[in-house]
Image (spheres, helix red, strand yellow):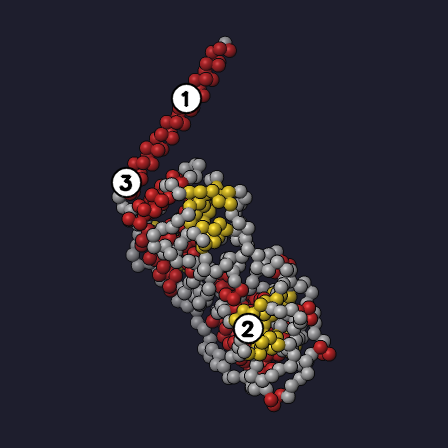
Amino acid sequence: MPDKFKQLVLTLFVFLIGFSQIHAQDNYQKWLKKDQQQFNKFLEEEDRAFLDFLKKDWQEYLSAQGIVFDKKPKPKNIPVAKKKDKPEAPLVDKIKKVKDIPVPQKKPLPPPPPKPPVKKQEHVITINYFGANVSVNYKRDFKLDLKSPINNEVICAAWQRMGSSKYKDLLKQLQNHKKQMALNDWGYVLLVHQTAKKIFPGSESKRNLFIWFLIIKSGYDAKIAYKENNIFLLLPNENLIYENRYVTLDNKKFYFISIDGKVNLDGKVYTYNGKYEGANKLIALKLPAVPQITNKIISKSLHFKFKNKEYQIDVQYDNDIVDFFKKYPQTEIKIYFEAPISNYADYSLLNALKPHVKGKSELEAVNFLLRFIQTAFDYKTDDQQFGREKYLMPEETIFYPSSDCEDRSILFSYLVRHLLGMEIIVLDYPGHIATAVHFSSDIPGDVINYKGKKYTVCDPTYINADAGMAMPEFKKVEPKVIQL
């Protein structure tokens, strides 16, 4: 074949490919316009206004590094208190006895399973929500076609399709499950995520679009961002979230949320500065109640020694609640101190410990609980155990093989308040967390004066230390006080 003829054939081939791509793109644009016009008939007024906004107001942003709670590393080796370091023992008859605080009398029963949907649609899915089987049904009209490259036009088309779908029935079912299972805002985000994962199993970008849509339609503020062909979920929060990258929009931190793993956020992302009308709520991480998902109850025996006597404390915890907290963002430490624990852990802990503190003086009861926390649990820093900072809820401290200073202080605080009925504050030192308890009588040793009251330092990490003993390296350090 002559060279000129070969060149002519090659040129014609390249032209045909280019023409077909242009033709295909033109057909896609025509289809998109027709598709959007059809869906637009069913959109609500808020959707129309939001779509007009999304079509034009996207900008580049550089995500900020996640916030670090405390840059000073925690002590890896914990000191052991010696007898000579202990404060002089006060006269026992001058110390008030602990209050007789009632503890749960009836062994808890598992919560009823989530109710199945009443109104049946085309398709039913069952979600394993940390041990609880949650069923929802929906009409199969959530199909999302994400053409490459991702841009605001593709995202607008996706919102248009979802906004004109039969999403309201699905949304009502999810909100009913939220109420029945006593989920907080973050628990609801996880439920929506699990639902999106079932409907869009193969695409994280589609899942994030769907979560964004449903969270906004639930009244929460939310955004998405895109980079190349990836779509990311952005959520503002009432509370700080540590370690997650974020962008600041509308004078709020919008955190990049990836429930299934880390995301690559090097470089800039595209997102918008504005919001959907009526989506004003912020996701809150405060936990008013433990999720009602109890399924797998585990027993555990804890051993320690107090005043040369051996003790065994038998406790139970809900393993599914532990799994729930594995998906919890790292947030403000006060939330952990004020969090409730499952009925099983509460019942078993309080009933196992009450006979040993009942009728005792406040000092002896507090020292008993201190020794329990100090020596029944192995110590490791979060970095040693998890490779990152992770505060533990009380249930998690029972579950995990080791814990560090804030985890022990959180559990100790829970017991002091719910078993002894005594006031307690949190002492936030650089690289260390401890507590201080308000006694009815003067207790010798290290104290903190706070709002006109005297609080005696109680360190659940300082091994064998009694009330009134601050860890040696923090004796002269002024802590930040967190009131509970």
Q: Are marks 3 and 2 in contact (CB under 8 Å)?
A: no
Q: Residue at x 65, y 73 (%)?
A: 470
What label does residue 38 carry, if any?
A: 3
Mark 1 or 2, nearer chain start: 1
Whether pointer 3 and pointer 1 mark residues with C-beta atoms closer than 8 Å, the reply is: no
Q: Secondary structure at mark 2?
A: strand
- Amino acid at the residue labelled 2: Ile
Question: Helix or strand or loop: what does disc 1 sit on?
Answer: helix
User: Three-letter amino acid code at disc 3?
Assistant: Gln
> How far is disc 1 from disc 2 in space, using C-alphas?
76 Å
How packed mark 1 is, by other alpha carbons closer than 10 Å (few <14, some 14-19, many 20 or more), is few
What separation in Å lies between label 3 and label 1 (alpha carbons)?
32 Å
Name the residue: 48% across, 60% down. 239
Image position of 403 with respect to 30: above or below: below
What amino acid is found at the position of numbered circle 1 in the picture?
Answer: Leu
Question: Which residue occupies 42% across, 47% down?
Answer: 273
Q: Report which residue position mark 2 lands on.
A: 425
Residue 292 is at least partly visible in this image: yes
Does residue 286 sit above or below 227 in this rendering? below
**Dot 2: few (<14), some (14–19), or many (≥20) neighbours within 10 Å?**
many
- For the residues marked 3 and 2, what is the alpha-carbon distance in whole angstroms? 60 Å
Relative image position of residue 28 (x, y in whole percent): 36, 33
User: Residue 134, position in %: x, y?
Assistant: 40, 58
**Residue 352 at what x, y percent from top left?**
55, 77
Front-most of residues 469 and 386: 469
Q: Which residue is mark 1?
A: 16
Mark 3 or 2, nearer chain start? 3
